[in-house]
Image (cartoon, grey):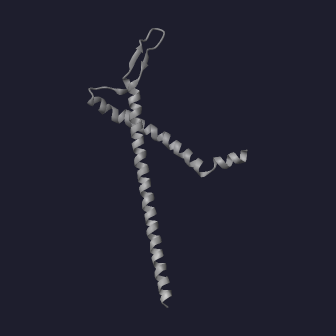
Amino acid sequence: MFKEFKEFALKGNVVDMAIGIIIGAAFGKIVASLVNDIIMPPLGVLLSGIDFSKLAFTIKEATEKNPAVTINYGQFINVIINFIIIAFVIFIIVKQINRFKKEEKEKGEKEVKKEEQLLEEIRDILKNK
């Protein structure tokens, strides 16, 4: 069982996935900072000084013993903006990767066509002799 686990854990796909998850977590922090520190303050100014992270509905007021019960929809707005930015960046990255793969495939097809053409010419020359 240990041997099977070792083979599974050391497969290229598993290692690649682990690296992707680690990089993704770090990228998430960068995007969160981008949204919270760069995008949201000017957006708040444009919307009359609203700080989205502070927006909340109070369900129950705070008492001496208990804190207030709130629905923090401003935080939810920040998370949605984070998601949209991350999704857009991933879309752009995947689109570029697909474009590069397509170019490589077309380049390979052109090389194969040249080889086929040369082989056909050689065949025709041999046939005529």
| Residue 73 image position (x, y, % from top left) | 39, 25
Outermost residue on the front side: it is: 127
* Rendered position, 113 above or below 97: below
Residue 96 as seen in the image, left or right of residue 49: right
Residue 47 as seen in the image, left or right of residue 120: left
* Rendered position, 9 above or below 74: below
| Residue 36 image position (x, y, % from top left) | 38, 33
| Residue 17 image position (x, y, % from top left) | 55, 46
Q: Residue at x 67, y 49 (%)?
A: 7
* Rendered position, 10 above or below 37: below
Location of the N terminus by quadrant is top right
Q: Residue at x 38, y 26 (%)?
A: 74
Residue 4 as seen in the image, left or right of residue 34: right
Q: Residue at x 41, y 46 (%)?
A: 91
* Rendered position, 113 above or below 54: below
104 vs 10, nearest the viewer: 104
Outermost residue on the bottom side: it is: 129
Q: Residue at x 43, y 66 (%)?
A: 107
| Residue 126 image position (x, y, % from top left) | 50, 87
Q: Quadrant of residue 106?
A: bottom left
Number of numbered discs on residues: 0
